[in-house]
Every structure is written in structure tokens, then in C-alpha cells.
Image (cartoon, rainbow, N blue to C red):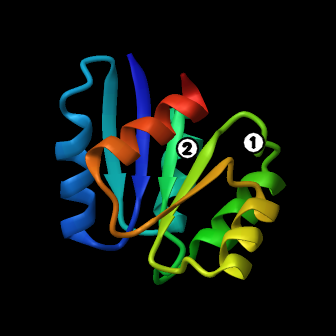
């Protein structure tokens, strides 16, 4: 069972992603509200197979989360896909340079999410 961690402050989006991923029998999905909770979860439970990460969140945003992940030496062990409404070229480049493996713009479809997950973690 591969673990996926959703890090997003939107209850609606966390629920939507869980619904989208519920068709995959080999994924165990957990969701948290911000980057700090995401890091705490990773430290407590170990590295997930994938993190789906929002950028704009309270407490710790997505770019800060990626920086802390690198600081902990987990940047290469935890693949991250940013899912954000921030979709300008500069935003995408900033996310990828911070360590994300891919960038998905909101709104997105279930098929787009599944394709990007397959591309990133197989």
C-alpha cells in the first residue's frame, strides 16, 4: 500500500482529492491542513510515496514546506506534486526549483490527477 499525503488548507479540495483517489486500491490517503502539519506527519509516520501540496496555506506555505523537507534531507526521498491556483510560469518555475517533481493547476480533473501521479510515482 502506497501512502499519499495531501497538504492543503481547503476542506473541499482535500475531500475532492480523496474521492478522486478512492478508486485506486493501492493508495492510502491522509490529509492535513498546512505545511507544518505535513512535516510533523512525515517525521512521525515516515516518508509517504507522494505528497500533494498546495502553495498558499497558513502557518507554513508550500514553498516553505519544500525548503524544510530539503533541510531534513528528505527532498529526494519524498516526491511532491504542487496543486495550486497559482499557475503563472514564474509560480510553476519557483515550485519546481524548490523541489516539486510536478505542478498541477487548479481546477483539475480526476484523469489529470491520476496521470500526474502515475508519471511521478508509477
Locate residue 72 relative to residue 64 in the image: left or right. Answer: right
> Residue, x 48% and y 48% (percent of image)?
41
Picture coordinates of residue 19, whole percent (x, y): 17, 45
- Check disc 1 and report its element: helix, strand or loop: loop
Q: Secondary structure at mark 2?
A: helix
Where does residue 31 sit, x and y in percent of width and height? 33, 52
Q: How many marks?
A: 2
Are circles 1 and 2 on residues that touch, CB within 8 Å?
Answer: yes
The N terminus lies in which quarter of the figure?
top left
Q: Is residue 38 left or right of residue 120?
A: left
Spot occupied by residue 63 in the image (x, y as percentages of width and height)? 67, 71
* Disc number for residue 29: none
Q: Few, some or many C-alpha atoms within 10 Å of disc 2 (few <14, some 14-19, many ≥20)?
A: some
Q: Is residue 106 visible?
A: yes
| Cα distance in 3D space between marks 1 and 2 | 10 Å
Q: Is residue 99 left or right of residue 84?
A: right
**What mark, if any, has residue 74 been given in the picture?**
1
Can residue 46 be seen in this snapshot? no
- Image quadrant holding the C terminus, namely top right
In the shown orientation, is residue 75 left or right of residue 57?
right
The one nearer the camera, 63 or 107, is: 107
Residue situated in front as seen by the camera: 42 or 12: 12
The percent coordinates of residue 56 (x first, y second) are 50, 81
Please tell me which residue is depicted at 82% across the width and 63% down the height of the picture.
97
Residue 71: quarter of image: bottom right
- Count neighbours of disc 1 (C-alpha within 10 A) and say few if under 14, some if 14 to 19, many if 20 or more: some
Label whose residue precedes the other's in the sequence (1 or 2): 2
Residue with the mark numbered 2: 42
Residue plotted at (64% across, 65% down): 65
What's the residue at 70%, 61% (across, down)? 66
Amino acid at each position: 500500500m502506497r501512502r499519499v499525503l495531501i497538504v492543503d488548507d481547503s476542506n473541499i479540495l482535500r475531500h475532492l482529492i480523496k474521492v478522486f483517489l478512492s478508486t485506486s486500491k493501492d493508495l492510502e490517503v491522509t490529509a492535513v491542513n498546512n505545511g507544518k502539519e505535513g512535516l510533523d506527519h512525515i517525521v512521525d509516520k515516515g516518508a509517504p510515496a507522494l505528497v500533494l501540496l498546495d502553495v498558499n496555506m497558513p502557518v507554513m506555505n508550500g514553498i516553505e514546506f519544500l525548503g524544510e523537507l530539503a533541510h531534513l534531507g528528505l527532498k529526494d526521498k519524498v516526491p511532491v506534486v504542487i496543486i495550486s491556483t497559482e499557475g503563472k510560469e514564474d509560480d510553476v518555475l519557483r515550485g519546481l526549483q524548490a523541489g516539486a517533481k510536478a505542478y498541477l493547476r487548479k481546477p483539475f480533473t480526476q484523469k489529470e490527477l491520476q496521470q500526474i501521479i502515475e508519471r511521478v510515482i508509477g
